[in-house]
């Protein structure tokens, strides 16, 4: 635990499993009070909160149910964030995918994905930005994707939503900078979570294309997020930080 984390609250949207779970664990270990949302993982969320509360008894942990594809529930969660004393930051990690060929996109499904991946993020980021700027301190992090900058077959709408996140975060970073608040975009490659489960049959093939020859782990994204929340990262804003085993650095074609 660092002194700089004491009595500071960080919200994590989508924290009960997968990458969000890695982030919640890392921020808890840093000494932050952590409030995280979940949609369907109620059991996991309750167990996580209770486990963290037992382990870090001088910190506070809360979980809140919110379906972030529902605008009214996003508003309610945003109001909670805005009203939180000692708010220090937001990690927008919740997200979903919609796999289809670019020429076959169904607009209703695409718009629903944008609500979850993009619009909910903008609403929560705006709710956090105002108190953070008043406090002249804080961090906003979006968990994006390498698909924002690298085309992947079947990912057009997912990639577009992640690209929209990136454009928004860069602008937000510029607008908040004079108030001492940073915003950054973490860009994971292939991370070992349920989101990757549909591709299990191709895992060996995919791993051969990754320079480091393996999927990343949620804890590794947690460690990067932890660093971005540290005082050592105060001069980093408006950036895209890949965590992808080298995928975005170039091709790794091997037999
Ligand atoms: P998971 O499928 O394991 O987790 C998805 C998370 O998003 C869960 O916390 C889930 O909550 C939450 N979520 C999904 N839909 C909703 C919704 N409608 N309302 C609120 N919360 C919702 O995926 P990952 O952990 O892998 O993904 C986390 C983030 O990382 C996503 O934004 C994803 O796009 C991104 N990412 C992941 C990569 C990977 O390889 N795994 C690669 C690049 C980016 P609940 O369980 O409670 O329903």
Image: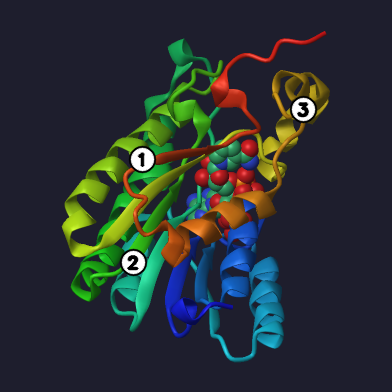
For disc 2, the neighbor class at 10 Å (few under 14, some 14 to 19, many from 20) is: many
Tell me how far mark 2 sits from mark 1, CA to CA.
19 Å
- In front: label 3 or label 1: 3
Q: Quadrant of residue 233 in the image? A: bottom left
Left or right: 44 with respect to 243? right
Label 2 residue SS: strand
According to the image, label 3 marks what residue?
213
Q: Mark number for residue 165?
A: 1
Residue ID for mark 2: 138
Q: Residue at x 45, y 61 (%)?
A: 232
CA gap, disc 3 to disc 1? Answer: 28 Å
Quadrant including the C terminus: top right
Residue at screen point 19% across, 63% down: 179
Give how far across and how far down residue 84 sits, in percent.
34, 80
- Which residue is most to the bottom? 58
Q: Is residue 102 above or below residue 140?
A: above
Residue ID at (44%, 24%) = 149
């Amino acid at each position: 635990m660092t002194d700089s984390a004491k009595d500071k609250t960080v919200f994590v949207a989508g924290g009960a499993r997968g990458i969000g779970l890695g982030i919640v664990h890392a921020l808890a270990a840093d000494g932050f009070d952590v409030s995280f949302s979940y949609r369907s993982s109620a059991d996991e969320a309750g167990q996580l909160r209770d486990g963290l509360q037992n382990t870090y008894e001088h910190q506070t942990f809360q979980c809140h149910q919110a379906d972030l594809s529902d605008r009214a529930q996003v508003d309610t969660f945003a109001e909670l964030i805005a009203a939180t004393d000692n708010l220090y930051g937001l990690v927008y990690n919740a997200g979903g995918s919609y796999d289809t060929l670019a020429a076959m996109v169904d607009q209703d499904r695409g718009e629903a994905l944008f609500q979850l991946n993009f619009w909910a993020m903008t609403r929560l980021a705006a709710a956090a930005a105002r108190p953070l700027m008043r406090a002249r301190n804080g961090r906003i992090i979006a968990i994006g994707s390498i698909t924002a900058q690298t085309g992947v077959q079947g990912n057009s709408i997912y990639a577009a939503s992640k690209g929209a996140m990136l454009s928004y975060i860069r602008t937000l970073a510029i607008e908040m900078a004079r108030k001492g608040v940073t915003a950054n975009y973490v860009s994971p490659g292939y991370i070992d979570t349920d989101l990757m489960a549909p591709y299990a049959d191709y895992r060996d093939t995919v791993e051969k294309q990754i320079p480091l020859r393996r999927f990343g782990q949620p804890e590794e994204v947690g460690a990067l997020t932890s660093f971005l929340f540290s005082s050592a990262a105060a001069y980093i804003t408006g950036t895209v930080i890949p965590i992808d085993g080298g995928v975005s650095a170039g091709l790794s074609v091997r037999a």
